[in-house]
Image: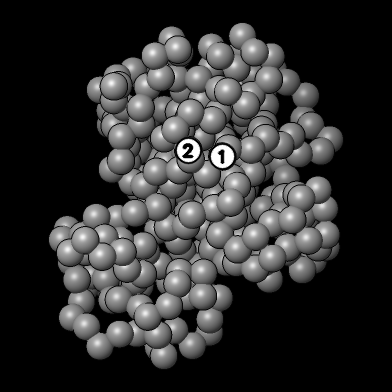
Amino acid sequence: MKFIIYLENKVIKTGIINEEGVKELSCPIIDAIKTSEIAKFLKDQPITNLSDIKILPPVKPSKVVCVGLNYRDHALELGMEIPQEPVLFIKPPTTVIGTLDPIIYPKSSKQVDYEAELAVVISKKAHQIDEKEAKEYMGGYTALNDVTARDLQQKDGQWTRAKSFDTFCPLGPWIDTEINPSNLDISLKLNNEVKQDSNTKNMIFPPEELVSFISNIMTLHPGDVIATGTPPGVGPMKVGDVAEVSVEGIGILKNEVTQI
């Protein structure tokens, strides 16, 4: 099932997507992705067309935990050794925007890159959990663009500034709860030209291992997001470009690069 946060008539709502459109729910999205009885949360309201609403980010995470170099084909592209453990960094919640929201190109950077990723949405508090039980904490999946000021990353010698500008974490368009995260086509188009094209089966560390590994470092809260790494083909964007992240079974996350 696909769950969405949206704005309709200036009111923020939670909904479930079907073939006809969006059906409003009476519960928060985290409760929706956890329940096995979604019918009891359906509101007696008409179905709304997707074209009539503004899609918002599907969650408001306390943190976005990202994984670097997690695709074998990406490591091969870069001529780098396969890491023995996941390499982690964090994006603050102020980076998060939704589909069709603008990515703002910071004036302090000369190279801003796209990075298409599958993201895991945590559905319940996870603290020091075992890999075998990780799926119990993985409420669903969405698409993410780990936007990066590459020149600042290289200049600083670490990643915090380069990854943390406002709008540098497009997320969405919604959460899917029924896909298999270990075998999904993932791609990115820049101005309709395919730049990244791979499959999550090329991950070095699968999502369940990542959730367990991270939970043994920091407590994960409901709504937190784990970005599982990007495939090969990462490259720069410029003002006016349109980036589209596509994850099989989820949908398309689309954002234009702007500057203020």
Disc number for residue 95: 2
Residue at which label 1 appears: 92
Number of residues whose C-alpha sits closer than 10 Å to that of mark 1, classed few (under 14), some (14–19) or many (20 or more) = some
User: In percent of the image, x 73 and y 45: which residue is there?
Assistant: 205
Residue 223 spot, x, y in % from top left? 56, 59
Q: Amino acid at mark 2?
A: Thr
Is residue 14 among the parts visible in the rendering?
yes
Disc number for residue 191: none
The answer to whether residue 135 is above or below residue 260 is below
User: In percent of the image, x 30 and y 21: which residue is there?
Assistant: 259
Residue situated in front as seen by the camera: 38 or 248: 38
Residue 121 spot, x, y in % from top left? 56, 58
Is residue 115 among the parts visible in the rendering?
no
Residue 109, by quadrant, is top left
- Horizontal side of 51 relative to 173 (left or right) equals left
Residue 137 spot, x, y in % from top left? 67, 66
Number of residues whose C-alpha sits closer than 10 Å to that of mark 2, classed few (under 14), some (14–19) or many (20 or more) = many
Dot 1: what SS? loop
Dot 2: what SS? helix
- Horizontal side of 21 relative to 203 (left or right) equals left
User: In percent of the image, x 65 and y 68: which residue is there?
Assistant: 124
Residue 52 spot, x, y in % from top left? 15, 61
Quadrant where the C terminus is found in the figure:
top left
Q: CA distance from mark 1 to mark 2?
A: 6 Å
Q: Amino acid at mark 1?
A: Pro
Residue situated in front as seen by the camera: 119 or 52: 52
Disc 1 + disc 2, Cβ < 8 Å: yes
